Image: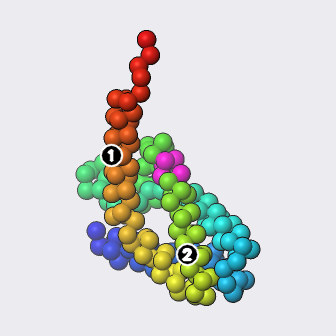
């Protein structure tokens, strides 16, 4: 668990957002001095590339590797070998994670791009990105649960309201 707090957390909340904002938002902030219709094209293009860049990678997280080790379900002490093993075993789940990663990073890119240009500050974009990475592991499961509940309620109401065919 110390590894997660000393390496994983700073990487997720500080270093990755810093690098990504310098790559994806700093050029926008330099190119556009204010939001305009042309700036919006830049924001959407940059956000799309930013989201697509999140497709890549194994999508296996350190807590999964540590959990497998704690439960005796690991085959090796080599982290890379365990990542590859888990990636092979959870093929469909990895694909779902990749799609969700792209879908959920698109709005982040749009927000960070808009506010970065509006305030002419990569620091604002970095702050939004860091806060997003800090809060999404907590907020996302809640949003997904609410989405499932809404879907179940709507489908239940729909089944009661629609006429039955004979």
Query: Who's the residue at 64% across and 63% down the image?
Result: 48
Q: CA distance from mark 1 to mark 2?
A: 30 Å
What's the magenta region? 94-99
Q: Residues within 10 Å of mark 1 (few under 14, many from 20)?
A: few
State the quadrant of the C terminus: top left
Query: Who's the residue at 42% across and 54% down the image?
Result: 82
Q: Quadrant of residue 148?
A: top left
Query: Would you say 53 lies left or right of 45 here?
Result: left
Pick the residue in front: 42 or 159. Answer: 159
Pick the residue in front: 72 or 154. Answer: 154
- Residue 138 screen position, x and y as percent: 33, 64
Q: Which mark is residue 99?
A: none
In magenta stretch: residue 76: no
Q: Nearer the viewer, mark 1 or mark 2?
A: 1
Query: Who's the residue at 66% across and 67% down the image?
Result: 44
- Main structural element of the magenta stretch: helix, strand or loop? helix
Q: Quadrant of residue 137?
A: bottom left
SS under mark 2:
helix
Query: Mark 1 highlights which residue?
Result: 149
Query: Mark 2 highlights which residue?
Result: 112
Pick the residue in front: 99 or 153. Answer: 153
Residue contact at pointers 1 and 2, CB within 8 angstroms: no
- Residue 151 screen position, x and y as percent: 38, 42
Lower position in the chain sequence, tag 1 or tag 2: 2
SS under mark 1:
helix
- Residue 70 screen position, x and y as percent: 25, 56
């Amino acid at each position: 668990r110390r590894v997660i707090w000393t390496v994983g957390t700073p990487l997720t909340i500080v270093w990755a957002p810093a690098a990504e904002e310098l790559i994806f938002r700093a050029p926008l902030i330099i190119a556009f001095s204010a939001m305009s219709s042309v700036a919006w094209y830049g924001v959407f293009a940059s956000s799309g590339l930013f989201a697509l860049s999140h497709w890549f990678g194994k999508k296996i997280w350190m807590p999964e590797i540590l959990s497998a080790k704690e439960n005796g379900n690991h085959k090796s002490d080599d982290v890379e070998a365990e990542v590859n093993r888990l990636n092979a075993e959870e093929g469909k789940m990895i694909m779902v994670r990749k799609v969700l990663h792209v879908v959920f990073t698109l709005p982040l890119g749009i927000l960070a791009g808009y506010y970065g240009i509006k305030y002419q500050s990569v620091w604002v974009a970095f702050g939004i990105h860091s806060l997003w990475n800090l809060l999404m592991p907590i907020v996302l499961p809640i949003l997904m649960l609410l989405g499932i509940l809404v879907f179940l309620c709507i489908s239940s109401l729909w089944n009661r309201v629609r006429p039955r065919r004979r």
